[in-house]
Image (tube, coloured by chain):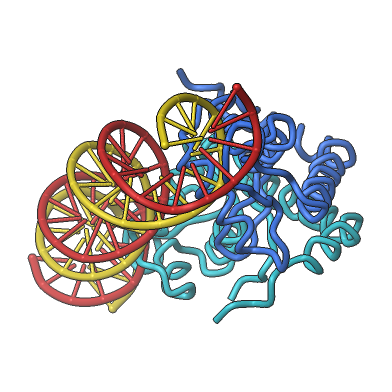
Chain colours: A blue, B cyan, C yellow, D red
DNA sequence: CTCCGTTATGTTCATGCAAACATAACGGAG
DNA sequence: CTCCGTTATGTTTGCATGAACATAACGGAG
C-alpha cells in the first residue's frame, strides 16, 4: 500500500500524485493503456479517463495513443509526459530528503495507526 | 482564490493543505471555531468537522475547545497544532524555494488557463 | 474477410461527500 | 433566571465521484 504520509501536487482542482505517476510509468513500461490498467488492477475506462484528464491539463498531451490491432494499437508517454514525471519526482525527492526533518517531526505527533 | 499550483500533505486518506492551514490560522487569530468559520465564509459545522478530523489524526489535539458564553467559550490552537502548522509551512517553503525550478518547468507545460 | 486487442465512448447504479438546515447543551454575563 | 454566543450533534438533500457494465470504431495479422 501507499506510504502513510505522502504528497500530491495540485493543478487547480486536479491532483497529480502517486497514482497518476504510477499510471504513466506503467503506460511507458507496457506500451498500452489497457495493459497498464490491468497491471494496476484498474479498469481500462478508469485509466483512460485519468489519461484524458492529464492530457487536458497540458498544452501538449502527456500520452499519445494509436488505435488498431495487436501490433499497431497502443499508447506512449511523450517527452512532455516524461518531463512532468521527472519534475514531479524531483519535487517528491526534494521533500523526502531535505524535508525529512519536518516529516519526521509531524510523524512523531501522529496518533498510532488505526486498524 | 488559491494559486493554480499548490501542494497537499496526505496522512493516509486525510489531506492537510492550504484550507486546513488557513483554518488553524483563523482559529488562532479569532479565538473560536465559529468566528474562524465566519471569517472564511465557511459554516460552523464544516469548520468543526475539519477540526475534529485533524484532532483525530494526532496523538494530542491540534485545537482545544471550551463551551459556554461569550467570554468563556472558544477554541485555541495547541502547541501541537502550532508545531504541525510550522512544519507544514516549512515543507511548503522548501518546495516553493528550492523546487522553484521544477515548479516553473511544469507550469511552462500547462495549457493556458481555462475560463 | 475474419479475428483480436486496442482505443474510445456511453449508461447506469451505488457510494461518498459537502452543503444546508435544524436542534441541543453549555456556561458566564447581566 | 434570562440571554447570548459558543460548542456539539443530527438529518436531509443535492452533487460529484467512482465502479460496473455495455458497445462501437479501429486496423494490422493471418
Q: Nearer the viewer, residue A42 or B58?
A: A42
Residue ID at (47%, 56%):
B75
Q: Quadrant of residue B115?
A: bottom right
Q: Where residue C9 sits: x, y (%)?
A: 40, 57
The vertical placement of A71 against B76, above or below, is above
Residue A84 located left or right of residue B27? right
Q: Visible in this render: residue B80?
A: no
State the count of labels: 0
Q: Where residue A80 sits: x, y (%)?
A: 79, 56
Residue A43 located left or right of residue B25? left
Q: Quadrant of residue B44?
A: bottom left
The vertical placement of B17 against B79, above or below, is below
Residue ID at (60%, 65%):
A12
Q: Residue furthest bottom?
A: B115
Residue ID at (81%, 47%):
A82
Residue ID at (84%, 46%):
A86
Q: Nearer the viewer, residue B110 or D13?
A: B110
Q: Where residue C20 sits: x, y (%)?
A: 23, 70
Q: Visible in this render: residue B67?
A: yes
Residue B112 located left or right of residue B62? right
The vertical placement of B27 against D18, above or below, is below
Q: Quadrant of residue A97?
A: top right
Residue A54 located left or right of residue D19? right
Location of the N terminus of chain B by quadrant is bottom right
Q: Where residue B45 sits: x, y (%)?
A: 33, 58
Amino acid at each position: 500500500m501507499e506510504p502513510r504520509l505522502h504528497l500530491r501536487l495540485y493543478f487547480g482542482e486536479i491532483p497529480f500524485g502517486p497514482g497518476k505517476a504510477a499510471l504513466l510509468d506503467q503506460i511507458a513500461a507496457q506500451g498500452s493503456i489497457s495493459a497498464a490498467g490491468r497491471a494496476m488492477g484498474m479498469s481500462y475506462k478508469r485509466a483512460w479517463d485519468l489519461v484524458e484528464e492529464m492530457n487536458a491539463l497540458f498544452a501538449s498531451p502527456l500520452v499519445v495513443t494509436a488505435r488498431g490491432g495487436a501490433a499497431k494499437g497502443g499508447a506512449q508517454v511523450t517527452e512532455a509526459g516524461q518531463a512532468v514525471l521527472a519534475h514531479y519526482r524531483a519535487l517528491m525527492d526534494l521533500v523526502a530528503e531535505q524535508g525529512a526533518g519536518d516529516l519526521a517531526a509531524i510523524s512523531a505527533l501522529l496518533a498510532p495507526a488505526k486498524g
